[in-house]
Structure formats: C-alpha cells, structure tokens
C-alpha cells in the first residue's frame, strides 16, 4: 500500500515540527474555473507556562504569507500541489481541552491580481497581448494563445474596469479561454495561463469504475443535461460605417472527447446574445462560438478516488480516462475540480469531471500500470 507524505513550507521555510504536529486537516481545491484554494486546520492550546496560545501567537500566517504544499503517493516524486497566499484566518477558542483551533485560508497567486481596481485603456492590442502584458506586470511566466483582432485605437480601444484578474476573466470568456495561475512543477515558478482548454493532452490517468481488482474509484455519478443551447446569435453595430454586424453559430468546435455530440441539431435550442460590447462580426462570431463550446460541456461526473489503489495525484485542468461507466459515459473527460483532503494518514480525492461528447472514439488506451486492460 503506497504511503502518502507531504511537506508544508511557510514563506520558503519548512514548517516546524510543532506546527506539523498541530495540523489536523489540509484541504486543497484544484479548480479549472475558479481560483485554487488551500485550507488548514490546526489545533491550538494554552502554552504550558500560561503565557499565550500555541501557533496563534506565533503569527506565522500573516496577510499574503506564502504557503507551499507538496505531496507524494508511494514512490512517486514529490509534486507541488499548490502555492498560495494567506487571505484569512479564524481562531476558535474553547473551554474544553483539544477543541480550540486555528483555520487558515489561502488562495493561489491570482489573488495578487485582485488587490487593486483600475480603469485603464489598452490601445492597439489584442486580448492575448493584454493578457501577456498583465501577467508580465506581476513577474509571472506566461502560457498565452493568440487571439484576433488587434483593436486599433482609432476604431476601438479595450477599457479595463476592475481588477486585473477580473478583466482577464472577461477577456477569456469572450474567447472561450481558460485563465488561471498555476505553479510549474518543474521549477516551482508561477505561470499565467490564457488559452483554450488543452483537450488533446495525453490523459493523466485511468479511472476504473466497478472493475474488480482494477477498481480505483469508490463512487462515480454521471449526469447529462440535454437542454443546453445548440445555436447562438449575436448582433452589433459597426464602428466605422454603422453597419449591422451579425453572427450565428451552431454546435461546438472544440475537439470532441467522444464520438457523439452532446448538442444535437434536431429541434435546437437557440440563445440570443445581447450587451456584448463588441462591434465586429468576427468578434461576435468568436463570442457566439465560445458560448456554444461552453454549452457542449453537457456531461458532468462526480465521485471520489480510492487513493491507495489509484496511486497518484489527480489534477484539474487536464484530461483523464474513465472506464467501466457504460458505453455512453466511458471515455475521456476533462477534470474540472479535485478536492484533496489530508488528515493524519488519510488522503482522499473528490473529483468533478466534464465532457463535451458521448461514447468512445476508439482511440482511447485504457492500459496503465495500476489498471487492468479494458
């Protein structure tokens, strides 16, 4: 049975044995659509000499203090699970011994981009240029995919109103992109991402449902929402000549993770997009397509891993294979969320997956070291 070990650093220094002994639970929420979060629960008590409280009075968890958690399962290399900044602490003092605790909440480095609201123009730049520039202001490495068009100042200038990260989320939404900041496991640096979901990556693992000795999932539930929009229309007014600019899109364009679409064309559901703030037909088309690409994620699966049988760490923002869930729900999924919970010798991983297609493509390979052939 593989052992689970972890290390916790506070502002670049390994947590002391006293702090580690006080840790009751660590939770890390790894998310594709929201900021990654860390939550610590530590036992506290009155010092033996009565001079104060343990941990609480050490003032370790100051505002925006850096926390880094690395985890390994069995013989696997230690993997950085999250680099985060402290944003909240809660101390609970009880009369009964052993019931007092300190709870610490930390957020990934994107919190640094949410500290100041701004109003500023971004002339002569595309959305991807803006993303690269904003990430650069924080010293982050960048993984940015190009977007069109580059807006000319004489015609249209993008105006930011809000924090840098709020603005990046707006730009990402109208391009069908993800936006997040993640620690690069190779060198530990923070990297800003602004790109479409990477669906063509090699699946990180195989989740095996109800397959005897090969099973590594305790529970698995899949849901298919059949009434999501299948057509989108958008309209605007051209800046130069005041001409009508229209766009109509049908179906998703992202790589399908299965052989059957989740957006059937018979008796389609249509949505009309309004108040887009866009004026060119090409931009409206990109937005309409982004709406339908998001709509195609009509299959959502939830469950929890048997971590010891799984033998590794499941990560969000990457594909994973599922087998043993029937012809419609087996295949490749995109990991939306993983909640990692560490408590003593226990390590649980609860997941949410999403899928933009049904059935198999015949290209899946379910062979893995810790799985039986499918």
Image: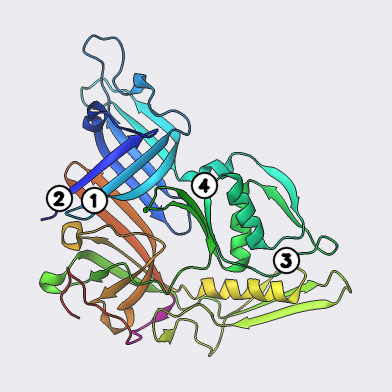
Of callouts 4 and 2, the N-terminal one? 2
The residue positioned farthest toward the right in the image shown: 241
**Sequence-wise first label, 3 or 2:** 2
- In terms of image quadrants, where is residue 345? top left
Could you say where residue 360 lies in the image, as x and y percent from the top left?
A: 33, 84
Q: Is residue 360 magenta?
A: yes
Q: Main secondary structure of the magenta part?
A: loop
Pick the front one: 322 or 372: 372
In this image, 47 relative to 66: left or right? left
Sequence-earlier tag: 1 or 2: 2
The residue carrying mark 2 is 3
Residue sitting at x 64%, y 68%: 147
Relative to 26, does residue 62 appear above or below in the rendering? above
Q: Residues within 10 Å of mark 1 (few under 14, many from 20)?
A: many
Q: Which residue is mark 4?
A: 110
Q: Which mark is residue 150?
A: 3
CB under 8 Å between callouts 1 and 2?
no
Q: CA distance from mark 4 to mark 2?
A: 32 Å
Q: Which residues are magenta?
A: 356-362
Q: Which structural element holds mark 1?
A: strand
Mark drawn on residue 72: 1
**Residue 276 image position (x, y, % from top left):** 71, 65
Question: Which image quarter: residue 102?
Answer: top left
Residue 165 showing in the rendered view? no
Res. 265 visible in picture: yes
Mark 3 secondary-structure assignment: loop
Q: What whole-number distance in Å separates the C-alpha atoms at marks 3 and 4?
A: 25 Å
Q: Is residue 140 left or right of residue 312?
A: right
Labels 1 and 3: the sequence-earlier one: 1
């Amino acid at each position: 049975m593989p052992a689970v070990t972890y290390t916790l650093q506070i502002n670049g220094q390994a947590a002391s044995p006293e702090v580690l002994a006080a840790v009751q639970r660590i939770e890390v929420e790894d998310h594709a659509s929201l900021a990654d979060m860390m939550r610590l629960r530590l036992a506290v008590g009155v010092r033996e000499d009565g001079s104060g409280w343990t941990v609480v009075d050490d003032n370790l968890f100051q505002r925006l203090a850096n926390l880094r958690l690395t985890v390994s399962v069995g013989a696997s290399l230690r993997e950085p699970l999250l680099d985060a900044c402290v944003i909240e602490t809660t101390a609970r003092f009880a009369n009964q011994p052993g019931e007092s605790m300190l709870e610490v909440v930390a957020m990934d480095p994107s919190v640094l981009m949410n500290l100041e609201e701004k109003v500023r123009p971004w002339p002569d730049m595309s959305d991807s240029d803006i993303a690269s520039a904003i990430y650069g202001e924080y010293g982050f490495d960048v993984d940015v995919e190009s977007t069109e068009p580059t807006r000319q100042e004489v015609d249209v200038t993008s105006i930011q109103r809000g924090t840098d990260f709020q603005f990046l989320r707006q730009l990402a939404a109208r391009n069908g992109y993800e936006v997040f900041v993640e620690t690069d496991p190779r060198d530990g640096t923070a990297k800003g991402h602004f790109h479409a979901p990477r669906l063509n990556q090699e699946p990180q693992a195989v989740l095996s449902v109800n397959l005897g000795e090969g099973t590594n999932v305790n529970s698995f539930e899949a849901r298919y929402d059949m009434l999501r929009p299948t057509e989108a229309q958008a309209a605007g007014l051209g800046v130069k000549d005041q001409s009508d600019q229209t766009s109509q899109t049908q179906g998703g364009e992202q790589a399908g993770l299965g052989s059957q679409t989740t957006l059937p064309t018979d008796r389609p559901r249509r949505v009309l997009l309004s108040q887009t703030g866009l004026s060119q037909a090409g931009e409206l088309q990109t937005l309409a397509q982004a709406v339908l690409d998001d709509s195609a994620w009509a299959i959502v699966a939830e469950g929890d891993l048997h971590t010891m049988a799984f033998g590794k760490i499941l990560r969000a923002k990457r594909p994973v294979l599922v087998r043993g869930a029937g012809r419609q729900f087996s295949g490749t999924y995109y990991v939306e969320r993983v909640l990692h919970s560490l408590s003593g010798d226990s390590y649980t991983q609860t997941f949410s997956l999403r899928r933009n297609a049904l059935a198999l493509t015949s290209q899946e390979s379910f062979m893995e070291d810790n799985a039986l052939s499918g």
